[in-house]
Image: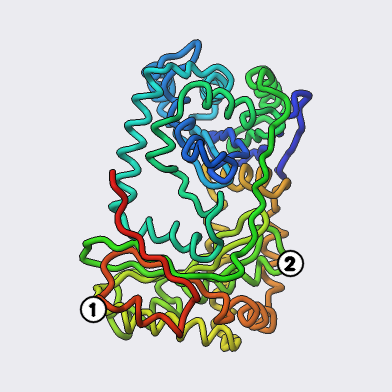
Amino acid sequence: MSVQRSILPSGVRVVSERLPGVRSAAVGAWVGTGSRHERPTEAGISHLVEHLLFKGTERFSAQEISERIEATGGEINAFTTREETCYHATVPSDRLEVALDLLGQMLTAPLLDPEHLEMEKQVVLDEISMYEDDSEELVQDLILEATLGLNGLSRGVLGRASTLRRLGRPQVERYMAERYTADNLVVAAAGQVEHEWLCRQVEHRFASLPAKRHDLPTSVRANPEPGTVIRRREAEQVHLCLGVPGLPREHDDQYALAVLETLVGGGTSSHLFQELREKRGLVYSTYAYHAGFAETGVFVLYAGCRPSNLEPVSEMLRAELDRLSHGEVDRAEVERAREQLRGAYLLGSEGSVNRMFQLGQGELLLGRVVEQEEYLEELNRVNLRQVRRLARQLFQPERVGMAVAGAPPRGWAVRLEGRGPARTRIRRPRRR
């Protein structure tokens, strides 16, 4: 059965797909809000709210939320990104009403108890400390800063300890009133799901949300002068990213971009992995990815290595960018990457959980669900000429930003001057 979509009288969007041969159901409440939608003075509030909604509602305590979902044999969880927050559950299909009841209560009737708020702030502060100790994760945020500048997109999802400590219930209530609204919510479900029944359940449980969201100015453009950001810290490894401004989430070249991303660093057969790991043994981990947002994107090449290998590794990453800037991609690479994407998409579409994620993200971030046939047809149309043109367009030397987390050799940053990005910022570890 094909995807079914409805807009309810409240304004909530519902999208579902009935999957034959499964006895489970996955459901997600997708809210169009994330760290990019925060005021600078409330950085981290999106993720904090995600934590708080599990601490109890008007009808259920935190323990009862866990007990009710686990009594079905299912599970419930959530995550926050820069542009979305999702609360999702997986249950046997005949217990889907239990999951919807819990999600509805969490989004429409959370307690927001001040004591719970202070407790979860401490939990998130510990999470920030763990993040600061994870250089591979940290450098992914630093490359956004180097490539896009300082703005809502480059700010980390966890926020900052200094702003988090000042957040109180009034700020949380205001944020939820502005962002947790009916017109900013998508409920997606996949598995043994009957669409009309689902719509009735969602309208009953979520209609009390405020009707209209409040938007802050959040538009971001690529930094006209990409730079280098270095966070020095004592570590066994140094983590390096090179990045260029990419494409927005919806773009005529989005399928060619997916092929380019895959052939550069999308697995152990990719050019990066073969050159840096298999042939030379300079790194343990290396990959490439593109992160697309509403109005821009970032294409990133990553490598983690010993400090003594940083020089040759950075040179090889730059050589890869130079290769790409001249469109040096061959037909076999394109065909192999295209086939890899096709297989990954088909495998990723199996199962109620995977399909629910595809439905929810598509409806929330694109305003529509890309059908399987459309994806495969568009992917099949990608040709060598498109990929070469896009590579030449993206990877010009003047567009490259750099981020480093760890302990690069002394004098390494100085040697960047005159041959790399125009400005270098060296950051010391933050005080906790």
Disc 1, disc 2: CB below 8 Å?
Answer: no
Does 177 sit above or below residue 192?
Answer: above
For the point 51% across and 54% down, the residue is: 154
**Disc on the earlier residue, 1 or 2:** 2
For the point 63% across and 19% down, the residue is: 205
| Foreground of the two, 272 or 5 | 272
Give me the C-alpha separation between circle 1 and circle 2: 42 Å
Residue 202 is marked as none
Q: Residues within 10 Å of mark 1 (few under 14, many from 20)?
A: few
Q: Secondary structure at mark 1?
A: helix
Does 317 sit above or below residue 95?
Answer: below
Q: Tell me: 306 left or right of 286.
A: left
**Corner quadrant of residue 408:** bottom left
Q: Position of residue 218 (x, y in %)?
A: 64, 47
Q: Position of residue 172 (x, y in %)?
A: 52, 26
Please state which amino acid type lies under the numbered disc 2: Asp
Would you name the residue on which mark 2 appears?
A: 252
Q: Secondary structure at mark 2?
A: loop
**Corner quadrant of residue 338:** bottom right
Would you name the residue on which mark 1 appears?
A: 308
Q: Seen from this angle, which residue lies furthest top?
A: 59
Query: In this view of the protein, can residue 94 be seen by the observer?
Result: no
The image quadrant where one finds the N terminus is top right
Does 254 sit above or below residue 64?
Answer: below
**Corner quadrant of residue 374:** bottom right
The image quadrant where one finds the C terminus is top left
